[in-house]
């Protein structure tokens, strides 16, 4: 049996996230064990959750934060087992992606890839991972031999210097959703100051997840 656990939660506009989460963290006894912020690219607000090993005072928290805070006792659940049940094996072409809890279930004719959530990036459940595996399957079946390769992942590993950005002489489109947080626009304005041939365009009604919510509009913007 696990020790008892309580959760206090409230919704917050993006501009209030830092203030409210800090108030959660600084509340007197009982102090939270952790405070997390849950955001979604298609929603205008977020959920802030604080976890406690003893019951917090919901009325006191509501008074401190200046808005309603919901307090609830969490059920005694084997969270590891529950999370594993939500990650069944994924079959993508000849590839079979599984966690250690499904060891030994790979078909004999499959290429088995053992990837545990929390240890490696990509369990195969996200469309990007599954899509890449299906693309590899297609490349193998068609014997397609590309002349060049686009390395997307390394773009997240290296940061361009100011000098490199100023020396980049190709046209650049800096696109953002007009519902994106202000930090996104600030980054875009900073890039415009460095890139010699760049323009910045807003996509109406979109936010940071515009590739999912407005794919056709993004395509038209790139082609314009």
Image: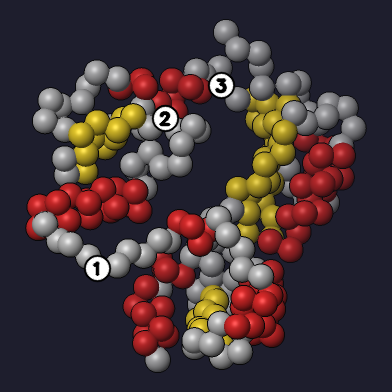
Question: How many other residues sit within 10 Å of disc 2, few (<14), some (14-19) or many (≥20)?
Answer: some
Q: 66 or 117: which is nearer to us?
A: 117
- The mark closer to the camera, 3 or 1, is 1
Relative to 20, 99 lies left or right: left
Q: Residue at x 64, y 83 (%)?
A: 166
| Disc 1 packing (10 Å; few <14; some 14–19; many ≥20) | few
* Numbered badge on residue 75: 3
Name the residue located 68 percent from the left edge and 26 percent from the top edge: 6
N-term mark: 1 or 2: 2
Q: Which residue is mark 1?
A: 147
Residue 221 versus residue 144: which sits nearer the camera?
144
Q: CA distance from mark 2 to mark 3?
A: 25 Å
Residue 201 seen from this side: no
In the displayed structure, would residue 89 be above or below residue 139?
above
- Left or right? Give the position of 48 relative to 39: right
Between the residue at mark 3 and the residue at mark 1, the CA separation in whole angstroms equals: 55 Å
Residue 20 relative to residue 84: left or right: right
Q: Nearer the viewer, mark 1 or mark 2?
A: 1
Mark nearer the N terminus (2 vs 3): 3
């Amino acid at each position: 049996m696990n020790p008892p656990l309580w959760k206090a939660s409230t919704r917050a506009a993006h501009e209030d996230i830092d203030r409210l989460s800090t108030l959660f963290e600084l509340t007197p006894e009982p102090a939270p064990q952790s405070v997390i912020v849950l955001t979604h690219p298609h929603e205008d607000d977020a959920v802030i959750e604080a976890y406690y090993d003893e019951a917090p005072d919901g009325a006191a928290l509501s008074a401190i934060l200046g808005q309603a805070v919901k307090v609830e006792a969490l059920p005694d659940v084997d969270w590891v087992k529950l999370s594993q049940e939500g990650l069944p094996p994924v079959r993508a072409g000849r590839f079979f992606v599984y966690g250690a809890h499904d060891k030994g279930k790979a078909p004999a004719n499959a290429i088995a890839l053992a990837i545990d959530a929390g240890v490696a990036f990509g369990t195969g459940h996200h469309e990007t991972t599954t899509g890449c595996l299906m693309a590899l399957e297609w490349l193998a079946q068609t014997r397609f031999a590309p002349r060049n390769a686009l390395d997307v992942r390394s773009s997240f590993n290296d940061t361009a210097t100011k000098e490199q950005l100023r020396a980049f002489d190709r046209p650049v489109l800096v696109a953002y959703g007009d519902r994106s947080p202000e930090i996104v626009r600030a980054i875009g304005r900073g890039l415009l100051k460095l890139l010699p041939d760049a323009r910045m365009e807003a996509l109406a009604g979109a936010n940071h997840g515009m590739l999912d919510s407005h794919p056709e509009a993004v395509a038209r913007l790139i082609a314009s």
